[in-house]
Every structure is written in C-alpha cells, then in structure tokens.
Amino acid sequence: MRKRQAQLLDELVGKVYHVNLPQCRDFGEFQDRLEFMVRNLAEISNSLGHGFAKHGFAKQGFSKQDDRRIRRAAERVKVKADRLLSLCGTMPDSFAAPEEWRAVGGNLTVNYDILRFDAGHLYRLVIPESPFSVLRSAL
C-alpha cells in the first residue's frame, strides 16, 4: 500500500543530512560538506533505484495517472542525483586559485537545490497530506 512508499521516503529522510554549501568559509569546510552531499546523493539513488522500482503504485491505492506521476518524479530525482554524484566524483582535490572552489560550489548548490525541490515534490506526491518541505528540508 501507500504505507510502504511512505516508509521508503521516511527512511530516506532519516538517512540524509542537510547540506548548505554557500555557508562554507574555506575549502576544507567545502570538502567536508561535499562528502555529506555525496552520501545523500548515494542514499537517494539507492532508495529510488531499489525501493520505487519494485512497487506498482496503481495496485496500491493510486490511480494510474498518479502512478505515472510518481514514477516520473522518482525517475527525475534519481537521474538528477546520479548526475550530481557523477559531477562530485570529478571534483579535484585542490584548485589552482584559492577561491576557485566557490564557483564550483555555486554550481553544485544550484543543481542540489533543484534536486531538493524535486525530492520535496516526490514526497508530496507519495504522501499528499504531508508538508511539501519534509524531504526537501532534510536534504
């Protein structure tokens, strides 16, 4: 039923950490927060890849239209998480200019915020009575 999908998302909320890259004061702090981001992205990819792929929502109280919306939203979040994970994997250990990491951090922040918004939308689709920002705030 819907409870299983809600449980999968609630478990994900419990596994992720809030990451705020713009507040980094130096490159070391940026690297620490980037590690949390990578962990979050891996959790998202794993949860949506395994948990949502197995369950047919239409059989569990969702209309076929809702089922398609949820699947598309889950796929969109997973693809964005995988792309960001790949991007994070290409990050250099150091930069030529001392403040160059800020530009990279800004790019990651924009993309991560879009992912957070889409994850909040997915959570709301699966659990319509929930506040929009539950999963978004956790990330």
Image (spheres, rainbow, N blue to C red):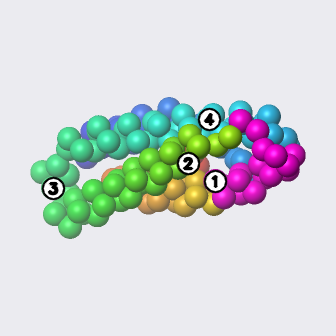
Q: Position of residue 126 (x, y in %)?
A: 33, 53
Residue type at numbered disc 1? Leu
Q: Are marks 4 and 3 in contact (CB under 8 Å)?
A: no
> Which amino acid type corresponds to the residue marked 2 in the rendered image?
Leu
* Disc 4: which residue: 36
Reading the image, the residue beneath label 1 is 108
Task: Name the N-terminal-most of marks 4 and 2.
Answer: 4
Query: In terms of sequence position, does the residue under pointer 2 or pointer 3 come before the other?
Result: 3
Judge depth for marks 1 and 4 and give the one in front: 1
Give me the residue at 45% from left, 36% from top. Answer: 43
Q: Does 48 sit left or right of 92 as displayed?
A: left
Residues at circles 1 and 2 in contact by the CB criterion of under 8 Å: yes
Q: Which residues make up the magenta segment?
A: 93-109
Mark 2, mark 3: which one is toward the viewer? 2
Q: Is residue 118 above or below residue 41?
A: below
Mark 4–mark 3 Cα distance, whole angstroms, equals 34 Å
Residue at the (54%, 34%) spot, across then down: 39
Q: Nearer the viewer, mark 1 or mark 2?
A: 2
Name the quadrant of the N terminus.
top left
Instruction: List x then y, in percent, for residue 83.
Output: 47, 51
Left or right relative to 52: residue 63: left
Q: Is residue 45 visible?
A: yes
Sequence order check, earlier mark of 1 and 3: 3
Circle 4 crowding by C-alpha within 10 Å: few under 14, some 14–19, many from 20: some
Q: Residue at x 58, y 54 (%)?
A: 112
Q: Is residue 86 magenta?
A: no
Element on which disc 1 rests: helix
Looking at the rendered structure, the kind of residue marked 4 is Phe
